[in-house]
Image: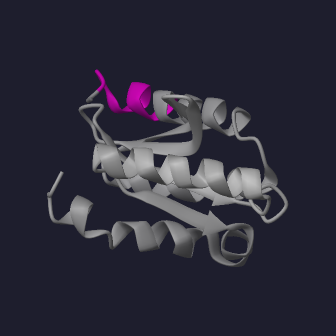
Amino acid sequence: MPYPDERTEAAIKRLRRMVGSLRVESPIEAKIYPALVLFWERQGCYVRAQYKLGHFRYDFAIFDPSGRLLALVECDGKAFHSSRRQRKRDRKKNQIARELGRPLFRFTGSQINEDAPGCVQSMGRWNGYWGGGL
């Protein structure tokens, strides 16, 4: 959505980044969030942290300029995603994304800590977005 002028647009983007960064819930989410915003805003898209979908909350959701959901992102820290109960919840989240026909990208804490921008760039190679298949 274009704004009346470039200053207003830049200010709104800065505000959106600040508000989004306040909503992250873990250090690995805080680490990947700036890379997500930087990459996807260049594509004209936007990122929402802690996106509620059904009974679940996803760490991040990517939306195209018209507000259509493109993809979901989960940051899987070892401590939180290693219990049997959490793995079951993760499978349900995966199923919801599949039913919607949207990709769910999962990155481990190790992947994010090692190369958060690389994780995000790997999303850019996803055929559904670049191929216009959504």
Looking at the picture, how far across and down is residue 61, in whole percent? 47, 43
Looking at the picture, how far across and down is residue 100, in whole percent? 31, 43
**Nearer the observer, 86 or 39:** 86
Residue 48 is one of the magenta-drawn residues: no
Q: Residue, x 64% and y 76% (percent of image)?
A: 115
Q: Main secondary structure of the magenta part?
A: helix
**Nearer the observer, 27 or 81:** 81
Side of 121 relative to 126 (left or right):
right
- In the picture, residue 110 is in which quadrant? bottom right
Q: Residue, x 54% and y 45% (percent of image)?
A: 60
Side of 85 relative to 124 (left or right):
right
Q: How many marks?
A: 0
- Determine whether 52 is above or below 70 in the image: above
Q: Does any portion of residue 101 appear in the rendered image?
A: yes
Q: Report the colour scheme.
A: one colour
Q: Does any portion of residue 34 appear in the rendered image?
A: no
Read off the magenta span.
3-11
Side of 23 relative to 61 (left or right):
right
**Nearer the observer, 46 or 132:** 132
Side of 6 relative to 17 (left or right):
left
Q: Residue, x 65% and y 34% (percent of image)?
A: 18
Indicate the quadrant containing the N terminus: top left, top right, bottom left or bottom right: top left
- Determine whether 11 is above or below 21 in the image: above
Looking at the picture, how far across and down is residue 39, in whole percent? 44, 58
Q: Residue, x 15% and y 57% (percent of image)?
A: 133
Looking at the picture, how far across and down is residue 91, in whole percent? 55, 55
Residue 6 is one of the magenta-drawn residues: yes
- Residue lying furthest right: 79
- In the picture, residue 114 is in which quadrant? bottom right
